Image: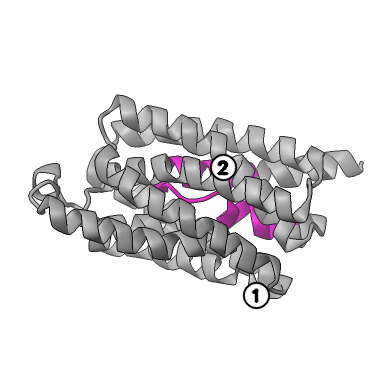
Amino acid sequence: MEIIYKFIICLIAGVGAGLGTGFAGMSAAAVISPMLITFLGIPAYQAVGIALASDVLASAVSTKQYWKNKNIDVKNGVVMMLSVLCFTLVGSYVASIVPNAVMGNFSIFMTLLLGIKFIIKPVMTTKEKMESVSKKKRFIQSIICGTIIGFICGFIGAGGGMMLLLILTSVLGYELKTAVGTSVFIMTFTALTGAISHFSIGGIPDLTSLVFCILSTFLFARIAAKFANKAEPKVLNRVTGVVLALIGSVILLVDII
């Protein structure tokens, strides 16, 4: 019975995480971490490690779909990624010395608020407008934003994906599909770095939960990414907003209960 219960929890977490990754470039930790901590009693640091490990394949398969549809800004994505990677390690170390209760709360509110934002105020920027920004300005913005995002990603895992999407759409002016594509491209590598550093510092987590979460997240991220790349911008904004708001609300409710 225990293995079935664990499978169900990991499946539900994987469905939410996969949809969030494929639609919004969200880190799997926004969903998986609270679920594992609340229902399986897994320590927060290990739960984030499992979530980041799940994020690697989910982000990679999503990246493939967005790449095929030319919805990734590779140049600036690499610049931001390098900044993110460096500070993910710093954030991961700081997280290892912070009490469990402090981790994860920020990401839940971030997910809910960002979901509401996409529903109320859709991102309708075009690729032409996005590409009109000067290369120098974009380069500097990418480094600064990457530094901030990297620390958050290493510290709570989920914040990185949400901050990436928020900054790419609101600060850097990306259209939604390119923002999500660039986000999952960056998150593939930051998640890998974060997972390795978490496992190195905190040890190998529960293998059963790890495998269940990785497989379910991967499957639903693939499905969501395929749909997202074919959807109209307005539809994608609404679907992304609903998915994020629903995930944020459910996790917030679970935490309160």
Q: In the picture provided, is 243 more to the left or to the right than 252?
A: left
Query: Tag 1 or tag 2, which sits nearer the N-term?
Result: 1
Chain part drawn in magenta: 14-36
- In the picture, the disc for residue 206 is none
Q: In the picture provided, is 231 more to the left or to the right than 63?
A: left
- In which quarter of the view is residue 251 placed? bottom right
Q: Secondary structure at mark 1?
A: helix
Q: CA distance from mark 2 to mark 1?
A: 23 Å
Q: Select label 2 or label 1 by which is in front.
A: 2
Q: Picture coordinates of residue 115 (x, y %)?
A: 40, 60
241 or 22: which is nearer to us? 22
Q: Picture coordinates of residue 189 (x, y %)?
A: 48, 42
Residue at the spot x=68%, y=47% of the render? 50
Residue at the disc numbered 1: 102
Residue at the disc numbered 2: 192
157 or 79: which is nearer to us? 79
Q: Picture coordinates of residue 252 (x, y %)?
A: 60, 68
Residue at the spot x=31%, y=48% of the render? 79
